[in-house]
Structures are given as structure tokens and as C-alpha cells.
């Protein structure tokens, strides 16, 4: 299992489009991908949009991402790129 | 029985907010999209697996519908509005929902409808707790998806399959984004909804397609029945159910004599427009959404006078990337053709934005909006400038700076744009030449217009905001609607002064704003010296027909008389009397300012 901390940097947080991008990306991999609030108050299956939206992760939220499976390293890398790029939204 | 007959004959009126102009007499088509009544049934053990299969078939059907809606939305509303349906698709495919539903059917022996409702309610309860406004709003997307599954389960055809009559007036509580995208735009004559406001999805799309719409009608949906005769008058913000014969006749006459022009749109085509005495007038289109692009050609616009670029932002307000903007501006440039398009830089902040930025401002109309926002968030300005400059290689594009209040705003924005131009050059990227203009919509800009004219390439007069700022009247506040007077002498003086300043500096000036789209006002504007008007495309035929029937040398003295007036009432009286007397065939009473009750 691999684990990494990620930060929500885009202005609207994990909103519908960002969540959709995340779910589409996560679904490309076999590994189980999970996101969890650092305080452990909520966790989500990254392949379920309803679950991801329920994290209610606004900008500035820090999350723990974990991946477990045959392609866990690739999966983690792909997901981290999305977070780092702010889901393609221009930064302000 | 007599009760019913009497009820049917009684005229009932609802007042709402007209969000897309026009008058229509038609037949109600009532659309259900609120909560469907769902009942619980208990299944025999042997029927459980069949119920699960029925659910799966309904989900497959809903999925096919959503795929269609998504691709249609991409082409008709633009990619930035279509993404929401991608999220809907993912929700529909989400195992979190479907597993719950199937489990519930199996363990509780419940019918699929009930199981869907229970599972959805559990999820929605969690959403209702979310503190972030925008994320909490996503509950409505889940409801949209759930309704779609329920409709699929019911076996009723979806909206797109309905046979719409020629004169359908869609009446709904509210139109969910997917329901709106599914309507057969060709056959919908008007839209009336209980909920909604000026910036609701319904309103934006209706304006783009030139379909009259009135929203905020409270309980109309509950009272109307499909097939009822109905009048929609968006100028008055009124919907009349079961109009009396006299009322219906009155409106049919108006439709036939004036706004019917919409349907005879293409007749006069694209020849240069001249007044009877030969003054050439250019009519351009104001554009927000790709859905309006078709109208630009159809209604004979000479290019795009105002492209409201902030509509490229997603519903939630996410900034479009440079690549997405570049693509959009190229498309706009190609559409506008040789007459070119003017991209207004993001008019963000204040009332335009809602959500994340505005809530911290106590006075958003006077706050960090438009060019101020772009200058503060310079990266936003740089990204947009690069996208426009690059797209200008595809066709003629100009930039106009919104809400300039001091010449320093122009200088600062120009410097940033210039830096980006230089950067593109050093990166050896392709770009085109653009002109930079100023929106004149703030009193301070009017009062310094002569100086401003020397530093910009053109003026755009934004009459909506000009009236708001000049008269200190919030145009969104019903309480002060009586004070919002486009024909106030101060407004006319401001327009006149701005036009003169532009002429003295030999730069063009385009008047964009709602004023230009009202024929009587357009004649006053022309009398004041305007030769270039930009408006929602669907109004062009109507204004064109009016201008082609008047003389400039007669409009000018009428405008001059208006400038001499002391009060807005007096100006309106001059307009009503002079235009009505001189060109009665062009100005039936309904098209002129209404007579005020004299004290």
C-alpha cells in the first residue's frame, strides 16, 4: 500500500467537475483508492462520485490518499497530478 | 360540472419576472419534474430478481438518455455547461447508490421505485449537512439523476419523445438542467416556471434561444393543466391562464403586429441597414452562450458587439484554462467573420459571481468586480489576454475593459496585455492584432470620456450599468424599480456626451445594453448620434425593421427635445407623443413607454 498527503488547491474544492475527473482517473486503475480527511472524520472511495462529493472537501482541505493493489504506484501518481494541477483550473 | 366549466372560463393572472423577451399565446404543456409520488409495494420472494432486472433496465435507459443529453449539451450549450452531465452519468453508474438500491430490494422485498427513493434520501440527508454552499447544492444533481431513474422505471417517455404541439408553452415548477437540455427547442414557444431568477439556467438558455420566458410564478404549475390556453407576456412579466376571448384577441393582435418579427427573421437578410434618409446603422449581437451562435447568423448580426466572456466560467464559477478560452474565442472570431467580435474581459465579482467572492462584500455592485477584479487577480487577466491575443490569429477580435472608472484602469490593463503580447512574441507563438476599448458605464468614465477617448481604440456604452450607477438604483431590487429609468435626462446626457467624445477623437462607439433592443429607445439613441448598436440577437430583426422605417433627420430633433426635458416622465412623454404621432405604424401603443399616473 502507498500513502500520500494531498492538498485541495483549486478554488471550488472537490466540486462536481473536479470529482468527476478524479473518479474517471481512479477508475482507470485496478487498485483500491481511498481518500480520507486527516482528522479521520470522513473517508471516501475515489471511484465513487457520491462518496467523493460527500467528503465536502473545500479549498485548503488536506487529505490522506491511499492506494492498494497491483498498480498502486501508477494510480497514486495519476491522482496526485490531478490534485497538484488544481484539476486544471487556473489558480488565483 | 358547471363548476368546472366556470373555472375554465375564468381568467387568472400571475406576476413574475420576464427573463427572456417576447409575447406568446399558446397551449400549456405541463412538465413534471418535482417530486414524483412514490409508493411502497411488497414483493413476493419469486419476484425479487425480476425487480432487480427491471431496475437495471431502467438505469441503462437513463444512461442512454444522459449520454444523448450530454452530447447535445456539448454542441448546443458548450462544453463548459455539459460537464455537469458527466457528473450525472458518474452518479448513475455509482455503485454506492446502485448497490444500496439492489440490497434494499433484496432484503426488504421492496419495489424498485421505493428502494431508489430510500437510498437517495439517505445520501441526500448527508448532503444537507454539508456546510459549503456550492458542494451542498450538488444535492440537486443527485435529485436530477434520481428523478431520471424514476421516470425510466415508470415507463413514461422522456420529454424529448413527447409530441409537442406547435404552440407549446412549457410550464414547470423549475426546469432541472437536464430537462432544459432535453426540450425540443424547435417547438417550445415559451417557458413559464414557478421558481428561478434572472441567472437561472432556464433564463440563460431561453435568452440564448430567443424563447420568451417568465420565471418566479409561485404556484402557476399547480394551477395549470396541459392544454389550457395561456398567454406569456415577458415584457410585463405576466402569465395569463384561461385568457378571456378579449384578452387573447388583444395579445394575438400584438403578436401579429410587432413581436411576430422574430419569426420573419431572415427576410431582410444581411444588406447594410440604412435609415430612410441614408444614415448607415450597424446592428451587432451580444452573445453569452454557444446556443446563441446560430442566432447571430440567423438574425443578420454584423459581428459580435459584446461577448460576455464570464459565461465561459462553469456554473460553479471555476476559471476556464487558457486552452479552453483560446478555443472559445477562436470559435467566436470565426462566427463573427469579417465584422469581428469584441470580447469583454471577465465581468466577475459583485452580483455576477455569487458564491465564493461576493459573500464577503457588503456592497458588491460597488466592490471588487469587472476590471478591478482582473487587475487584483492579475493571473486571471494574463491568462485571458493570452487566450484572446492567440485567438486573434484566427479572426478579428477586440478587447473591451468592463467598468473602467479611471484612466489608470485602462493604462494598467493595457500594460499587462502588452506584456503578454511581448511574451507570446518571445515564445514565438502565433497571435493577432487587437484593439483595446473601454466600457463606459460608470459616471466617472462619462465625465472623463474626452480624456479616455485619447487612450483607447473604441468605446462601448453599457447602458444597463450606466443607468444603475448614474441613478444609484439597484436594477435587481423590485422596491426601487420605479426609479430605474433608462430615459432619465441624465442618462441621455451621459450617452450624448460619450458619443460626442468618441466622435471628436475619431474612435468608434458601440451602444450595448437592453436600451438598444427596444425599438423606441433605439430611435432615440440614433437621434443622439449612435450608429452602432449591439443587442441580444433575437431582437435584431425588430430593431432593424424600425430603423429602416425612420429618418435620422427627424429622430435627431426628437432626441434633442428629450435632452431638454427636466424629468424622466417628460422624456417618456416626448418619446410616446412624437414617435407615436410620426410613425404610428412602427409604434403601436404597447411598444412605447407606458403612461404614468400623473399626481
Image (spheres, coloured by chain):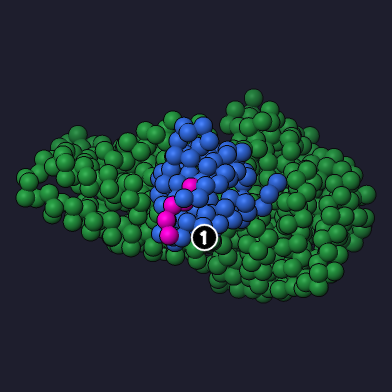
Q: Can you say which quadrant of the picture contains the C terminus of chain B?
A: top right
- At a point 45% along the width and 46% down the height, the residue shown is A34
Instruction: Name the residue tied to disc 1.
Output: A74
Can I make out residue B23 in this image? no
In the image, residue B531 lies at what x, y percent? 77, 61
User: In this picture, which residue range is highlighted in magenta?
Assistant: A66-70
In the image, residue B533 lies at what x, y percent? 71, 58
Compared across the picture, whether B101 is left or right of B354 comes to left
Q: Is residue B118 magenta?
A: no
- At a point 33% along the width and 63% down the height, the residue shown is B64
Secondary structure of the residue carrying tag 1 is: helix
* In the image, residue B71 above or below residue B599: below
Nearer to us in this view, A3 or B518: A3
Nearer to us in this view, B574 or A25: A25
* In the image, residue B168 above or below residue B282: above
Chain bearing tag 1 is A
**Chain represented in green:** B
- At a point 89% along the width and 51% down the height, the residue shown is B411
Nearer to us in this view, B396 or B468: B396
Magenta segment's dominant SS is: strand
Q: Colour of chain A?
A: blue
Estimate how packed mark 1 is, as few (under 14), some (14 to 19) or many (20 or more) residues with alpha carbons within 10 Å.
few
* In the image, residue B107 above or below residue A46: above
In the image, residue B181 lies at what x, y percent? 43, 57
In the image, residue B301 lies at what x, y percent? 64, 67
Which residue, as the protein is rendered here, is positioned at the far top? Answer: B599
Q: Can you say which quadrant of the picture contains the N terminus of chain B?
A: top left
Can I make out residue B10 in this image? yes
Amino acid at each position: 500500500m502507498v500513502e500520500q498527503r494531498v492538498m485541495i488547491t483549486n478554488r471550488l474544492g472537490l466540486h462536481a467537475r473536479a470529482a468527476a475527473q478524479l473518479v474517471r482517473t481512479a477508475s482507470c486503475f485496478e487498485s483500491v483508492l481511498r481518500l480520507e480527511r486527516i482528522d479521520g472524520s470522513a473517508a471516501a472511495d475515489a471511484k465513487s462520485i457520491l462518496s467523493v462529493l460527500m467528503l465536502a472537501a473545500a479549498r485548503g482541505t488536506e487529505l490522506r490518499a491511499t492506494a492498494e493493489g497491483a498498480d498502486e504506484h501508477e494510480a497514486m501518481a495519476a491522482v496526485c497530478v490531478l490534485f497538484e494541477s488544481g484539476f486544471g483550473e487556473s489558480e488565483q | 360540472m358547471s363548476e368546472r366549466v366556470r373555472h375554465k372560463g375564468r381568467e387568472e393572472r400571475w406576476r413574475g419576472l420576464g427573463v427572456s423577451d417576447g409575447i406568446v399565446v399558446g397551449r400549456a404543456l405541463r412538465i413534471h419534474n418535482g417530486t414524483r409520488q412514490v409508493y411502497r409495494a411488497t414483493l413476493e420472494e419469486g419476484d425479487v430478481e425480476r425487480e432487480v432486472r427491471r431496475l437495471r433496465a431502467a438505469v441503462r435507459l437513463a444512461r442512454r438518455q444522459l449520454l444523448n443529453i450530454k452530447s447535445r449539451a456539448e454542441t448546443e450549450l458548450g462544453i463548459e455547461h455539459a460537464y455537469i452531465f458527466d457528473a450525472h452519468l458518474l452518479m448513475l453508474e455509482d455503485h454506492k447508490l446502485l448497490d444500496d438500491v439492489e440490497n434494499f430490494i433484496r432484503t426488504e422485498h421492496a419495489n424498485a421505485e421505493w428502494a431508489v427513493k430510500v437510498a437517495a434520501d439517505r445520501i441526500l440527508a448527508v448532503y444537507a449537512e454539508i456546510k459549503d454552499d456550492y458542494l451542498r447544492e450538488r444535492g440537486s444533481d443527485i435529485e436530477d439523476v434520481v428523478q431520471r431513474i424514476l421516470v425510466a422505471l415508470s415507463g413514461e417517455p422522456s420529454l424529448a419523445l413527447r409530441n409537442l404541439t406547435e404552440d407549446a408553452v412549457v410550464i414547470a415548477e423549475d426546469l432541472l438542467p437536464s430537462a432544459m437540455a432535453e426540450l425540443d427547442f424547435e417547438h417550445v414557444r415559451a417557458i413559464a416556471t414557478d421558481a428561478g431568477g434572472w441567472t437561472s439556467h432556464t433564463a440563460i438558455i431561453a435568452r440564448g434561444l430567443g424563447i420568451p420566458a417568465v420565471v418566479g410564478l409561485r404556484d402557476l404549475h399547480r394551477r395549470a393543466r396541459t392544454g389550457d390556453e395561456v398567454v406569456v407576456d415577458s415584457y410585463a412579466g405576466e402569465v395569463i391562464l384561461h385568457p378571456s376571448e378579449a384578452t387573447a384577441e388583444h395579445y394575438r393582435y400584438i403578436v401579429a403586429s410587432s413581436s411576430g418579427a422574430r419569426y420573419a427573421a431572415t427576410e431582410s437578410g444581411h444588406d447594410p441597414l440604412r435609415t430612410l434618409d441614408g444614415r448607415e446603422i450597424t446592428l451587432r449581437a451580444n452573445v453569452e452562450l454557444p446556443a446563441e451562435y446560430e442566432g447571430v447568423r440567423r438574425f443578420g448580426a454584423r459581428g459580435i458587439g459584446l461577448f460576455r466572456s464570464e459565461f465561459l466560467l462553469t456554473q460553479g464559477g471555476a476559471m476556464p484554462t487558457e486552452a479552453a478560452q483560446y478555443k472559445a474565442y477562436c470559435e467566436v472570431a470565426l462566427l463573427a467573420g469579417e465584422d469581428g467580435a469584441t470580447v469583454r474581459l471577465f465581468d466577475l465579482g459583485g452580483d455576477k459571481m455569487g458564491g465564493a467572492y461576493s459573500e464577503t462584500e457588503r456592497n458588491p455592485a460597488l466592490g471588487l468586480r469587472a476590471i478591478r477584479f482582473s487587475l487584483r487577480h492579475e493571473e486571471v487577466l494574463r491568462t485571458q489576454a493570452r487566450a484572446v491575443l492567440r485567438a486573434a490569429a484566427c479572426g478579428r477580435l477586440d478587447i473591451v475593459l468592463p467598468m473602467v472608472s479611471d484612466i489608470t484602469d485602462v493604462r494598467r490593463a493595457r500594460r499587462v496585455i502588452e506584456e503578454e503580447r511581448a511574451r507570446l512574441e518571445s515564445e514565438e507563438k502565433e497571435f493577432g492584432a487587437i484593439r483595446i476599448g473601454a466600457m463606459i458605464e460608470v459616471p466617472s468614465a462619462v465625465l472623463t470620456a474626452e480624456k479616455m477617448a485619447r487612450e483607447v481604440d473604441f468605446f462601448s456604452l453599457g447602458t444597463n450599468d450606466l443607468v444603475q450607477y448614474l441613478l444609484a438604483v439597484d436594477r435587481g431590487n423590485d422596491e426601487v424599480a420605479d426609479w430605474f429609468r433608462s430615459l432619465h435626462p441624465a442618462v441621455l446626457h451621459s450617452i450624448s456626451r460619450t458619443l460626442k467624445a468618441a466622435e471628436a477623437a475619431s474612435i468608434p462607439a458601440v451602444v450595448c445594453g437592453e436600451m438598444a433592443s427596444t425599438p423606441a429607445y433605439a430611435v432615440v439613441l440614433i437621434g443622439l448620434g449612435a450608429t452602432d448598436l449591439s443587442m441580444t440577437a433575437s431582437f435584431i430583426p425588430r430593431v432593424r425593421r424600425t430603423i429602416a422605417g425612420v429618418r435620422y433627420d427627424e429622430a435627431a430633433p426628437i432626441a434633442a427635445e428629450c435632452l431638454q426635458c427636466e424629468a424622466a416622465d417628460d422624456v417618456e412623454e416626448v418619446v410616446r407623443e412624437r414617435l407615436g404621432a410620426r410613425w404610428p405604424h412602427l409604434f403601436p401603443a404597447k411598444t412605447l413607454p407606458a403612461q404614468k399616473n400623473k399626481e
